[in-house]
Amino acid sequence: MDKVNLMKIMLVGSGGREHALAWKMAQSPLLAELVLAPGNDAMAKLSSNNLAISRHQEIAADDVMALVELAKSCQPDLVVIGPENALADGLADELSEIGINVFGPSSAAARLESSKAFTKSFCQKHNIPAARSKTVTSENEANDYLETLSPPYVLKADGLAAGKGVVIIDDLAKAKASAKQMLDGQFGEASSKLVIEEFLTGEEASLFVLCDGETAIPMAGAQDHKRAFDGDTGPNTGGMGCYSPAPILDDYMSAKVMQQIVQPTLAGMKKQGAPFSGVLYVGLMIDNNQPKLIEYNVRFGDPECQVLMLRLQSDIIPALLACAKGKLAELEPLSWNYRSAACVVLAANGYPGVVTKGSIITGIEQAEKTPEVTVFHAGTRISTGGEVSANGGRVLNITANGDDLTQAVANCYGAVERINWHEGFYRRDIGWRGLRE
Ligand code: AMP
Ligand code: GLY
């Protein structure tokens, strides 16, 4: 590992994931200056010894041109990119071209998330275990393939659709109608191509892996809760809560995922001229001890990043820099807190649909009085007087450690009780899968 002097880091994004990354980086003795684009009010208030924070609220996290201009003018030692859109649009390529270290993949490597059709053909080519599927561009092709499958039917928009591009339907006629609607532009350009695939049964979990194009180092596993309401009912969301570690992703299973999925992915991407660097989010379905890939994401999960950051004991900056510089093989092993961490998302009523902004939230300080608890802000505004109000769909991430999952979850819900916010809701069953085992 290069000796790293005090650093200036530019962080792209404004959600709970980026708050957690900023919170963790702010604890590092290596960080002198943090540049937020656009950041959020809570991130701007992070303080630690002699850390200078500047914020460029006017720059959106997907505005590649403006982000490149900012990087040119502030010359950071590293840019850490939180969300996927700017990655798909080539932010990492542009920064690399001007000699700036960047944590996050090139646009070509980000296709692992931005094109499901690319990923399916990649998996076939490199023998990566995944659901049987076909990519279609016409109604006739869709209907013909659907007829060869048994229900439920899984239809996926090819491109980025803010987590909404997957539908699962029990009835053949309805699946055909839905395929037509998607091909007709339900998700715009993103659904002009569809991936139709067999339904996988089993248990879902995700493994997060640091990559530098060549070397891959597993971080930890997590399990998310994608549906809005208790009992995994209601619409799909960006994630309503999660926990780490995931009991199903034990050392044996993680090693299997590394060997059968991650290593061939890294080797395959390198061979195809698009080496992957950054963090690979490997979404899995595990059945009978056999993992299959459901999806890749090319960034940290949100809220999964929040629980990983709570559990990570090592300084994160050398790890992010090693990914950027192709030096992961030289990184000292990461050290993890082997206890559990959980996260409960407080969302505004109406999420994932239309929400009202501006309602007042109190009690966050009281919630954080328990040393195990950290509250990350996903969508809030903080007035100059310190009053917190809701400013998005997912609003707060109540995150806590515990000796085991039962305790971590109890610590989260204990903290949630101390927060007063009448216009929000949360799931009361975060952790149910892990607690059942
Ligand atoms: P994706 O955006 O590909 O992760 O899909 C969203 C969610 O749909 C996943 O988290 C799974 O719960 C579910 N899903 C996706 N593909 C499949 C599949 N082939 N079989 C069963 N469930 C799936
Ligand atoms: N929590 C799911 C995601 O970040 O995609």
Image (cartoon, grey):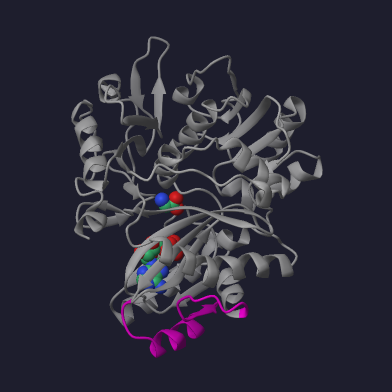
Q: Position of residue 82 (x, y in %)?
A: 55, 42
The number of numbered discs placed on residues in the rendered structure image is 0
Q: Is 238 left or right of 24, judged from the image as shown?
A: left
Q: Is residue 165 visible?
A: no
Magenta residue span: 125-152
Residue 248 in which image quadrant: bottom left
Q: Position of residue 244 (x, y in %)?
A: 36, 49
> Does 409 sit above or below residue 116?
above
Foreground residue among 80 and 149: 80
Foreground residue among 332 and 415: 332
Q: Residue furthest right?
A: 98
Q: Position of residue 330 (x, y in %)?
A: 68, 48
Q: Quadrant of the N terminus?
A: top right
Query: Magenta span has 235?
Result: no
> Does 338 sit above or below residue 386?
below
Q: Is 149 left or right of 350, judged from the image as shown?
A: right
Q: Residue furthest top?
A: 385
Q: Position of residue 425 (x, y in %)?
A: 23, 39
Q: Is residue 59 visible?
A: yes
**Residue under the image location 76 percent in, 44 percent down:** 96
Q: Is 270 left or right of 428, judged from the image as shown?
A: right
Residue 384 in which image quadrant: top left
**Residue under the image location 58 percent in, 38 percent down:** 61
**Residue under the image location 58 percent in, 64 percent down:** 115
Foreground residue among 50 and 367: 50
Q: Quadrant of the C terminus?
A: bottom left
> Does 184 sit above or below residue 421?
below
Query: Magenta span has 133?
Result: yes
